[in-house]
Image (spheres, grey):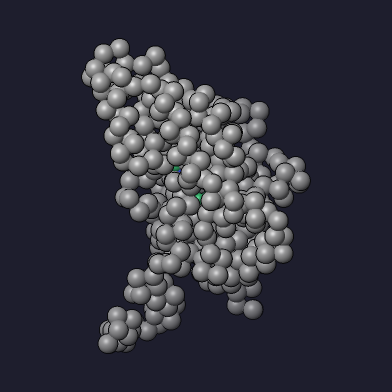
Amino acid sequence: MGVLAAAKQSMRRHNLFAFHEQYSLTIKYYFCGMETVVSGIRSTGHLHLGNYFGAIKNFVKMQHQHRCYFFIADYHSLTTHPTPEDLYRNVRQVLIEYLAAGIDPEVATLYVQSDVPEVAELYLLLNMNAYKGELERCTSFKDKVRTQPDNVNAGLLTYPVLMAADIIIHKATKVPVGKDQEQHLEMARTFANRFNRMYKTECFPPPYAYNFDEELVKVPGLDGSTKMGKSGAEGNAIFLADDPKTIRKKVMRATTDSGPAQPGEPVSPPVQNLFNLMGIVSSQETVAHFLDAYKQATIRYGDMKKQLAEDMIAFTAPLRERILALDADEEHLRKVARLGAEKARESARETIREIREIIGFSSAHTG
Ligand code: TYM
């Protein structure tokens, strides 16, 4: 007997069939080992190596093993007040780059967040049980207050609530993200658990941040900062769509130091960043060669950077080629977005119907 059939039989025996009816989807995926995965990327510009190694690499691996929902977080990007033209262009670009990186829209559900307005409804409902104090303590909010004091909008404050809505609308348990999203995931669990407790339900399973190699990843920037980011200083990030000339230029300008004066000196943080970047795009032999040169105090940063740039170019070249090809295929992009919206809405509608009933909205009873 299969695992699912055995689970059903055991439920029947223990008179849990009403429970089974209500939670059939969750149970089905749980017992089949097919968990639900959700993750998103904001449409605020081109994707970089940080997005790739922190998130997309996992998406591509997970799509064949789980029920996956990947989306373009365009509601989230509104906190930066893009023009309609910029918003449209950025959403399209992220869609292209998702596909170029290997997301198969026939396997995973790939959609644009604003095509699923049920997310906005769940966001509203969750906001009723999210408190000002806990939202103000969120590190990413505090960073924004510090870096953009003229635009501390309510969307920024409630950003983690919208993220929770994105995740639990599909009842996801695994959320592949980079290290910077860890606290947001903790908050998503808090909001999901709070809803369950408040309404005495088990509607939402708790979601967890996920990475294949166990530790969540944080890809460093080229400017000496610990995080590669879209909005960091110019030259901080290598974008998947960068051409070889641009990559060489950025890497050659990367921050280093004056070099080890004698064997055995400790590695400074910006140079460690370069070694870490090498660790993700270069072979182990290459990393070992330069580490050894560093230890012997014979390293020449120029040589190391040249090698790093060439390895980055070799890594991004096939992605860039696919990005350019997809850019010219408008019909395909439209088809992908339409298909994704349909599949995502079907799942989201089911959750909204269920929670409207749990909350006690009368329309749930009148149909
Ligand atoms: P965003 O758009 O800033 O980044 C998208 C994904 O890329 C990861 N990432 C990194 N990982 C490692 N090193 C880096 N330097 C680096 N930079 C970015 C991020 O951790 C993320 O996984 N709030 C999210 C988008 C979002 C979301 C969600 C994610 C909205 N709703 C629901 C998961 C589930 C964000 O701003 O990601």
Q: Is residue 326 left or right of residue 183?
A: right
Q: Is residue 284 above or below residue 326?
A: above
**Lateral position of residue 16 relative to residue 132, left or right:** left
Q: Residue placed farthest to the top in the image?
A: 261
Q: x and y percent of residue 315 in the render?
A: 47, 45
Is residue 362 visible in the rendered structure shown here? no
User: Residue 7's spot in the image, x, y percent?
Assistant: 30, 81
Image mark count: 0
Measuring 39% from the left and 40% from the top, which residue is drawn there? 282
* Front in this rendered view, residue 118 or 172: 172
User: At x 32% / y 85%, what residue is drawn?
Assistant: 5
Taking depth in this image into account, of 8 and 92 the one nearest to the observer is 92
The relative height of residue 222 versus residue 15 in the rendered view (above or below) is above
Q: Is residue 92 visible?
A: yes
Q: Nearer the viewer, residue 8 or 224?
A: 224
Q: Residue at x 46, y 64 (%)?
A: 63
Residue 132 x, y percent position in the rendering:
52, 41
Q: Is residue 274 shown above or below 84?
A: above
- Placement of the N terminus among the 4 image quadrants: bottom left
